[in-house]
Image (cartoon, rainbow, N blue to C red):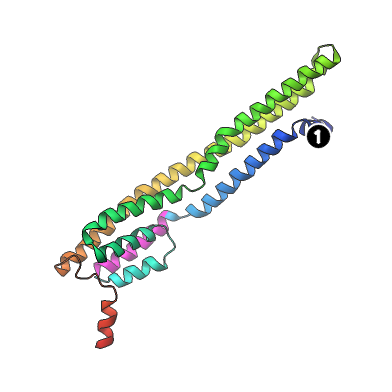
């Protein structure tokens, strides 16, 4: 295929190809953003969980709270919410942790709807270009008053280019969408396990103290040190 023919095809289908290009750029933007957001989330979250649980095992709720405030991993929001509720109403800690965990997992799916939209709509955009190309081919045949391959070849070629472009955009978008959905599902399962371990460690703090709220005041240890 010569460069002149390619220019003609792009000129004939520039509207559809421009739309598919916009679809493609949007899909790539979502892929890059989610790759960055989900990069090493599980290893980082596990390391963070281990530090928090270790602090709780040493009855140091203040350090656990400080770790949650300083950490940037999504799991920190779950643990921070759990510690805040534990200090006020310990019996509602499990419910609060579960609710915050679900909200955090939902936030990990941000923009995936856009990627799914690109993957599902791109083939139809390409199909629309195909229909337009075929209509132009028949219009050329009507204007020429004769049939034949030469009359309709350019319109059909443009139609096939639009179809191929639509399928290309859809293929990588659907693959990326399925990957991210699976990735978020794996993170959600790990977060559930981490939350259960966190709740067990937090419950042990109350058991050792004889009361689930005995160790609740985070500022108490610092105040005690100041008076000694």
Quadrant housing residue 204? bottom left
Q: Nearer the viewer, residue 106 or 51?
A: 106
Residue 190, percent across and down? 35, 50
Q: Is residue 47 magenta?
A: yes
Residue 73, percent across and down? 42, 60
Report the magenta stretch's main SS.
helix
Residue 120, percent across and down? 55, 33
Q: Secondary structure at mark 1?
A: helix
Quadrant for the C terminus, please: bottom left
Quadrant for the N terminus, please: top right
Q: Nearer the viewer, residue 162 or 132?
A: 132
Residue located beneath label 1 in the image: 7
Inspect this view and state whether residue 176 appears.
no
What span is in magenta? 42-58
Residue 203, percent across and down? 21, 61
Identity of the residue drawn at 33% across and 68% down: 65
Identity of the residue drawn at 56% across and 47% down: 30
Crowdedness near tag 1: few (<14), some (14–19) or many (≥20) residues, C-alpha within 10 Å: few
Inspect this view and state whether residue 115 appears.
yes
Q: Residue furthest top?
A: 146
Residue 204 lies, with reference to residue 148, above or below; the image says below
Identity of the residue drawn at 81% across and 15% down: 141
């Amino acid at each position: 295929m010569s460069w002149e023919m390619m220019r003609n095809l792009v000129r004939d289908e520039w509207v559809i190809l421009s739309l598919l290009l916009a679809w493609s750029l949007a899909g790539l933007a979502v892929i890059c953003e989610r790759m960055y957001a989900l990069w090493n989330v599980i290893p980082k979250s596990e390391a963070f969980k281990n530090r928090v649980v270790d602090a709780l095992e040493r009855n140091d709720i203040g350090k656990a709270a400080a770790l949650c405030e300083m950490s940037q991993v999504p799991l920190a929001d779950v643990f921070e919410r759990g510690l805040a509720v534990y200090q006020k109403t310990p019996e509602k800690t499990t419910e609060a942790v579960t609710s915050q965990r679900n909200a955090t997992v939902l936030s990990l799916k941000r923009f995936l709807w856009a990627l799914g939209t690109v993957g599902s709509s791109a083939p139809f955009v390409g199909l629309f270009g195909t229909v337009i190309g075929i209509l132009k081919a028949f219009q050329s045949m009507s204007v020429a008053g004769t049939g034949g391959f030469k009359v309709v070849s350019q319109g059909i070629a443009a139609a096939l280019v639009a179809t191929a472009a639509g399928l290309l955009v859809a293929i990588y978008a659907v693959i990326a969408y399925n990957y991210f959905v699976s990735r978020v599902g794996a993170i959600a399962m790990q977060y559930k396990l981490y939350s259960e371990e966190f709740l067990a460690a937090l419950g042990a703090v109350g058991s050792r103290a004889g009361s689930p709220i005995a160790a609740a005041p985070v500022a108490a240890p610092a105040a005690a040190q100041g008076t000694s």
